Amino acid sequence: MRIAAAPLLFAALLAALLGACQMAEVRDDRFVRFFDELAFGSGADGAADKRPVIRRWEGALVWSVTGSEAFQETVAARVALIAAIAGREAQRVPENGPIQITQDPAGTTYPVQDNLTACFARVLYAGDQIVRARIRIAEDTPGRIVRCTDHEMMHGLGFPSHSAAIASVMSPLHTQDRLSRWDIMAIRALMSERLAAGTPRDVALAEVERLLPEVRAFADTQTQAVRTD
């Protein structure tokens, strides 16, 4: 009995430890670095130079979706959540929305930066404002649709890059299957009224640091944030 119980005890202790680590607070400078890499560029994307200004979506999230009924339902729930986090109105239109999300057959792959991926976003700009996002997702299972929608919508809002600094749906290393608490904080900061498209990088990062107590408090009110951290 003792031999059989040992692995179970170890597994329980490991699960508790991992949970505690994920819920632990991160240092301010680490979160700011995470935001910096997502919004302005990171070595993981092969960009040697940082982008100089915030380039983001402005206004309501006007969107459309094509795909199976189950796909549309999953996407609609995630877009509604992301709009609430961003503090923006979400308006679904029948077709050809500025944010257009399309389901392709499962197994389709898209070439992105010399890799093949099951989902991607193509973002169009007018100056420093994002005016269109074309998101394609070749998945048919709810969990994978959620991860792709969360990831690609963050690109569409104004995070063109990736970061492995914190557990994130934008990390190339962590196996985060949906928005983490840190992603929620990053979206809330990016879409704050205290930032805008065209804000210089140094000004934006200083503002993000000042926003940290506010965005942490916001994330703490979200049951979704606690459940998916």
Image (spheres, rainbow, N blue to C red):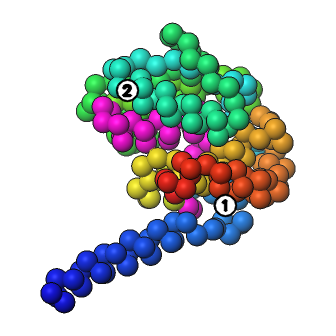
Q: Position of residue 224 (x, y in %)?
A: 54, 48
The outermost residue toward the front is 1
Residue where numbered disc 2 is placed: 71
User: Between 183 and 85, which is closer to the camera in this rendering?
Assistant: 85
Q: Position of residue 94 (x, y in %)?
A: 51, 10
> What secondary structure is marked by label 1?
helix
Residue 141 is one of the magenta-drawn residues: yes
Question: Horizontally, is 168 left or right of 190 in the view?
Answer: left
Q: Quadrant of residue 196?
A: top right
Dot 1 and dot 2 residues touching (CB under 8 Å): no
Q: Position of residue 215 (x, y in %)?
A: 72, 52
The residue range painted magenta reads: 139-166
Residue where numbered disc 1 is placed: 31
Specify which label sits upstream in the sequence, 1 or 2: 1
Q: Gap between marks 1 and 2, in whole Å?
A: 32 Å
Question: Which residue is located at x 36 percent, y 40 percent?
Answer: 144
User: Between 106 and 14, which is closer to the camera in this rendering?
Assistant: 14
Question: Which residue is located at x 70 percent, y 56 percent?
Answer: 216
User: Between 227 and 75, which is closer to the camera in this rendering?
Assistant: 227
Q: Position of residue 69 (x, y in %)?
A: 35, 20
Question: Horizontally, is 53 left or right of 107 in the view?
Answer: right
Q: Amino acid at mark 2?
A: Phe
